[in-house]
Amino acid sequence: MTGSLTIVGLGPGEPRYLTPAAQAALDAASDLIGYGPYLDRIPAQSGQTKHASDNRVEIDRARHALELAAAGKRVAVVSGGDPGVFAMAAAVFEAVEAGEPCWRELAITVEPGITAMLAAAAAAGAPLGGDFCAISLSDNLKPWEVVTARLEAVLHADFVISLYNPISKARPWQLGKALELALSVRAPDTPVLFARAIGRADEALRILTLTQAYEAAGTADMATLVMIGASGTRLIAREGRAPFVYTPRSVTKSPCATSQGRT
Amino acid sequence: MTGSLTIVGLGPGEPRYLTPAAQAALDAASDLIGYGPYLDRIPAQSGQTKHASDNRVEIDRARHALELAAAGKRVAVVSGGDPGVFAMAAAVFEAVEAGEPCWRELAITVEPGITAMLAAAAAAGAPLGGDFCAISLSDNLKPWEVVTARLEAVLHADFVISLYNPISKARPWQLGKALELALSVRAPDTPVLFARAIGRADEALRILTLTQAYEAAGTADMATLVMIGASGTRLIAREGRAPFVYTPRSVTKSPCATSQGRT
């Protein structure tokens, strides 16, 4: 087969965060597939066809991309951030596994991008300075009990925690529950970031305490990356400016000793 | 103060993974500071001074950078991958907090980059398709008991696990112990990646089972990112080519049900 499929990470949004490798993959494509607002970020090129879809039908989008590639097109599936992190890459490989045997022989590649967690961390200082994890708070694809079991595990083990897909109209209460759980383990003044649309023109970084974050949960949205600090995560105060937020590289105590609630 | 300090993520290595924002930060610098091999990747520019150091003295390098910035230089501290992930950013903020009060008033920014975990995942398929974590296996800065407590927590909670700094001459046994621990919880055929120097000319991706990875622990090195799949992580076999590795987005069972050993 002569077609190809590349799943391209656009990064946070502004072109200055798009890698040259990702740009080259976009330039080489005959067909671009993705959620409309992501496609809108990419300047039109002659000879290229854009196939916009809404944000819900990832697996259909993946199959459409594979069909086009199998028909000989050079397809780029575009994804915000990094395509491997709660984005399109896993959906494409699910479709490959469940789909036509010939799809396995396609040239399928992934172009990494700056995921929201890295952009948010860079904007704040160095909150990911220690061990960290990333959890999707969406319970569309996994039971809520799995989400809470994972949250409890990493809260007690003192990871910095990045929450993707924290809240949506259809999932209004999950972020509050997650932060309530965090409050049962971590100190109330633990730094929490609400990092919205970092790397775009309308970016907004809020540095809160865990208590404040719990009270403000309803002000987050799907474009917000929520990051809960570990026990060591600290602020460096600055005159007239937002503090730096960072997590020291060193850990001197056992992770259990940092927990305030249940162990 | 007129000086500035930017901590710049070079990404995996090849220029095609360097973001335009990071490139602009390098171009604007009067002084570049970093571990020699990272500085060597950056073409010399007239009027720029390079300050190479060895890989061990991160905090000294950070202080040196801050002193130069306080003296009015436009300093770029270069870091492989993303500077916020087990790299230079946290060291700089540690130095800021412990150092001269005037350092807090400096313009200090972080330019994110593609971290090794994202480059490795992209090369393999979509192994980070579910919840995941990143742990530095180095016990230079934290007790080994903290490392193992964290590993046990995320093994039982069924995260995909990326291990940074897996092995070095001074730390020869830690990776084997970590994989032994993984074998006590996860199935022996769990996919494990040994992803060495991905995004550089000499890149090498090995796709192993957990048992094979345990036996091959001694063949990893400091340039290797080790990724341990979750219970759902799968291979898609391909004729005459390496399989794709991916983690489905959906989880249907409780994380505890996936564990084979201690709970």
Image: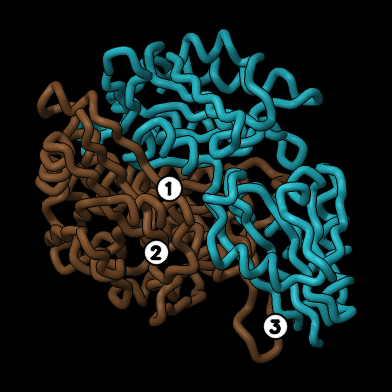
Chain colours: A brown, B cyan
Q: Label 1, on which residue? A: A112
N-term mark: 1 or 2: 1
Any part of residue A66 in sight: yes
Circle 3: residue type: Arg
- Please tell me whether residue A42 is drawn above or below residue A23 in the rendered image: below
Question: What is the quadrant of residue B190 in the picture?
Answer: top left
Please identify, in this view, whether the residue under mark 1 or under mark 3 is nearer the observer: 1
Q: A7 or A21: nearer the eye?
A: A21
Q: A178 or B209: nearer the eye?
A: B209
Question: Marks 1/2: CA distance?
Answer: 19 Å
Query: On the same chain: label 1 and label 3?
Result: yes
State the image coordinates of residue A105 (x, y, percent, origin top left): 23, 24
N-term mark: 1 or 3: 1
Please identify, in this view, whether the residue under mark 1 or under mark 2 is nearer the observer: 1
Q: Are marks 1 and 3 in contact (CB under 8 Å)?
A: no
Q: In the rendered image, which quarter contains the C terminus of chain B? A: top left
Q: Residue at x 77, y 51 (%)?
A: B39
- Secondary structure beneath label 2: strand
Q: Label 3, on which residue? A: A238
Most extreme residue toward the bottom, as rendered?
A240
Q: Label 2, on which residue? A: A225
| Crowdedness near tag 1: few (<14), some (14–19) or many (≥20) residues, C-alpha within 10 Å | many
State the image coordinates of residue A199 (x, y, percent, origin top left): 45, 71
Q: B156 or B79: nearer the eye?
A: B79
Q: Answer left or right for A26 relative to B197.
A: left
| Crowdedness near tag 2: few (<14), some (14–19) or many (≥20) residues, C-alpha within 10 Å | many
Any part of residue A146 in sight: no
Which chain is indicated by disc 2?
A
Which chain is indicated by disc 3?
A
